[in-house]
Image (spheres, grey):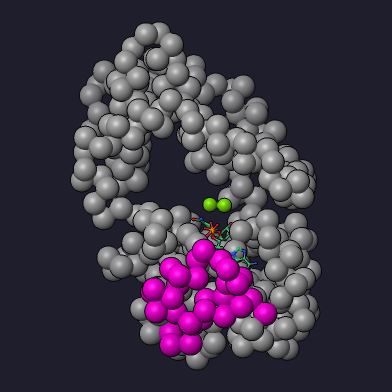
Amino acid sequence: MRVYYDRDADVNLIKSKKVAVFGYGSQGHAHANNLKDSGCENVVVALRAGSGSIAKAEAAGFKVMTPGEAAKWADLAMVLTPDEGQADLWEDDLRDNMRPGTAMAFAHGLSIHFNLIEAREDMDVFMIAPKGPGHTVRSEYVRGAGVPCLVAVDQNASGNALEIGLSYSSAIGGGRAGTIETTFREECETDLFGEQTVLCGGVCELMRAGFEILVEAGYAPEMAYFECMHEMKLIVDLIYEGGIANMNYSISNTAEYGEYVTGPKIIDDSVKDRMREALARIQSGEFAATWMLENKVNQASFKAQRRRSSEHLSEEVGEKLRAMMPWIAEGRLVDKAKN
Ligand code: NAD
Ligand code: MG
Ligand code: MG
């Protein structure tokens, strides 16, 4: 595995480019602000007329252009709009407006790997994918650290795509933590697998299931929330710091023994079989195709499930309990008015 650090990158390369950051959401606000704070003077944010993100980008001091204007202006278009709209963005605003020999970059491989976008051959196409949420990409940078990034090159028309990518990664803080070289396929398939089966799908279903079982058995929902949801962070912080052994060192022997005897009965081979099936659906393109079809029907099922998820009893209970701990909201990562 090839890992690059700040010392391997020429940060002046990205400073000499006109960078248009498309989108000012989770990743977009982090990239734009980190680039600016690293001394990149030619950064604009590209947003559609009427977008709710315009006021946030302007309040942070950015010039905002329409996607078409920004595409004509930019040497590098960093596409940080939602994956499901990137193919239309390419067709409508990028393909015919970007100058020959310019570059297009992504923070996730879906559009390129699954051929939702077929890029022009005269352009560089590469990826800088932070391995963390955008709000963390910003907060880590601000405290002098960084989130590790993946770099991958799909098209190298300039002969310089990797160098530009490494320079970009350093400017958003990735070079502090390490920039790992990979391919669009590997990033895309592992990222989808991780978020579906472990990080987002797996963990949230596990926590909600635990919460529901305790409530069903007659225990107070507040107790269930503390046990099965709130404490997740405390456990994960210990793993983040030093791995599972570090977490086991901190918890009681009773908890550790329970982990060994009960854990494998919950996450058993049948779970692993279903994880293999999920991976196969990702690799075959079935997941990408289903998600794009969902977008053709205005995300009917996606939006209904988002609403139902937000109405779960654990959300109501959690909100009350967090209010007892006002320090949780201090210095919060997500402030919907700003980022
Ligand atoms: P987001 O939903 O938080 O923000 C999207 C932004 O794009 C918004 O500002 C929106 O107004 C704007 N936008 C939408 N359509 C647009 C268009 N046609 N032209 C210009 N602007 C438009 O998105 P996100 O979660 O930051 O995801 C962006 C990309 O980063 C995706 O490829 C995603 O897979 C990748 N990524 C995200 C995370 C994350 O932490 N959220 C982590 C790694 C990679
Ligand atoms: Mg990911
Ligand atoms: Mg992802």
Q: Residue furthest front?
A: 50
In magenta segment, residue 41:
yes
Residue 159 counted in the magenta span: no
Q: Position of residue 96 (x, y in %)?
A: 77, 81
Front residue of 125 and 256: 125
Q: How far across and how far down the image is residue 146, in percent?
A: 37, 64
Which residue is painted at 41% across and 28% down in the image? 314
Name the residue: 30% across, 22% down. Answer: 222
Name the residue: 34% across, 32% down: 318
Q: Depth check: give the residue in front, 78 or 318.
A: 318
> At which x and y percent is residue 193?
61, 43
Residue 254 drawn at (x, y percent): 26, 18
Indicate the quadrant where residue 335 lies.
bottom left
Residue 168 visible to an observer of this rendering:
yes
Ligand 1 location (quadrant):
bottom right
Q: Quadrant of residue 18?
A: bottom right
Q: On the rendered structure, is 49 left or right of 254?
A: right
Which part of the image, by quadrant, shows the C terminus?
Answer: bottom left
In this view, 102 is above or below 27: below
Against 251, is 94 above or below? below
Instruction: Tell me where the magenta segment starts and ends, as one range.
Output: 40-68
**Total residue callouts:** 0
| Vertical relation: 78 (above or below) 145 | below
Instruction: Check the image and name the residue furthest to the bottom.
Output: 16
Q: Nearer the viewer, residue 111 or 72?
A: 72
- Residue 158 appearing in the image: no
Residue 53 placement, left or right of 295: left
Residue drawn at x 49%, y 41% as measured from the top left:
199
Q: Is residue 280 left or right of residue 133?
A: right
